[in-house]
Image (cartoon, rainbow, N blue to C red):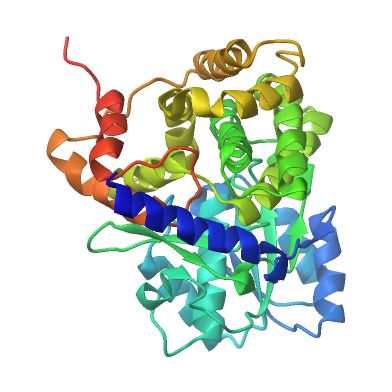
Amino acid sequence: MNPLKKIYCRIFQTAFKLALPLLPYRNPKILGSVKEIPALLEKKNCNTVLLITDGGIRKLGLTERLEKALADAGIPCIVYDRTVANPTAANVEEALNLYLSNNCQAIIGFGGGSSMDCAKAVGARAACPKKSLAKMEGILKVRHKLPLLIAVPTTAGTGSETTLAAVITDDKTRHKYPINDFFLIPDYAVLDPKVTLSLPPFITATTGMDALTHAVEAYIGNSTTHGTRENALQAVKLIFENLDTAVEKGFDINARRNMLRASYYAGCAFTKSYVGYVHAVAHSLGGAYNVPHGLANAVLLPFVLEAYGPVVYPKLHALAIAAGLADKNTPDEEAAKTFIAAIQAMKERYGIGDHIPEIREEDIPKLARYADKEGNPLYPVPVLMDSKELEQFYYLLMEKEA
């Protein structure tokens, strides 16, 4: 990256860090079960609710407890279950039409990050009917209070139940872009381990590593606070203690509950401290090839940490201690490399490879530009990289010909 751009990025990031105490960040209020939602809706005088989920979750029956609880309480529930893995503007408009035509007063995002992102975007469009999603791209473009928004995560990974971001894919260009505004933070997060029990092992693994990526990128960035550092360390500790059990023994409710807590803490950390180039590259892959976000993050994480080099060793040392992999007397470099190796070993245990076979070499310059645009100047990464430097990660992920 050229020196002038580096200076601009660091000034921008420093300004944001100095402004952190003045910005209206908040954490969602926590409910422990979906059965608590009807009483909440009645208290808020919400007579009809839009439930946004995806077809797979609906077929698994994960929404049945909630739908029955709403029916028993006499609250009409309109269901939109066509959300795709990387939600599109078309998804949002379809769901918005249901919201408006049925006079809904509240929105429930039920699922992984895709369903919650779709729910946030529907809320944003309902709040700003004259503004397209494309015009909300970036920071603080919504500026209006959303309808009551409740997030029910069925995966312990995205942290979307805590964040001010929704990531949407343009149907035509396949460009994946974030919308960031404090009004997008859900009012309530429902951390109900029962809705995660039937999550398949591979998805449990990739979403768990998504949460790990959130915690790691938030911790090693340059815009941390005492609170976000503590949240990131809590998340890493819980993930290393519980993810293997959640993957191998999916009906272990304590492991599932602890993974939901880890995802929540990681979400609280990166909402304020942001993420880094793992996410920027992963978003471009999701937009172009529909690669699941957690999978892309899991594949990328150790490569990006290695590329950052010695500048992140002290912070990775602290994360290694939280993970139970080192102590304070371990040299920084040794602890950092042990931590990266442990992430790589996780990938191997869970059957997560080192390649994204969908990548086409001719697409790499465009994808790197998308990642550059997303990451710079917003993400306070430990080492700045421009689009040419970011291309290295796409080449690393390409499958080598035999």
From the top left corner, tell me how far across and down residue 123 is, in percent.
57, 76
From the top left corner, tell me how far across and down residue 391 is, in percent.
25, 36
The residue at 47%/58% (across/down) is 11
The answer to which of 90 and 225 lies nearer the viewer is 225
Q: On screen, 187 above or below 229?
A: below
From the top left corner, tell me how far across and down residue 206 is, in percent.
54, 32
Task: Say how many tags the image has.
Answer: 0
Residue 249 in sight = no
The residue at 80%/76% (across/down) is 41
The residue at 18%/43% (across/down) is 365
Q: On screen, 107 above or below 280?
A: below
Q: On screen, 250 above or below 43?
A: above
Residue 139 in sight = yes
Quadrant placement of the N terminus = top left
Q: On screen, 375 above or below 90?
A: above
Task: Name the side, left or right, on which 303 lies relative to 67.
Answer: left
Task: Name the side, left or right, on which 128 lies relative to 30.
Answer: left
Task: Name the side, left or right, on which 147 lies relative to 328.
Answer: left
The residue at 28%/33% (across/down) is 394
Quadrant placement of the C terminus = top left
From the top left corner, tell me how far across and down residue 287 is, in percent.
33, 51
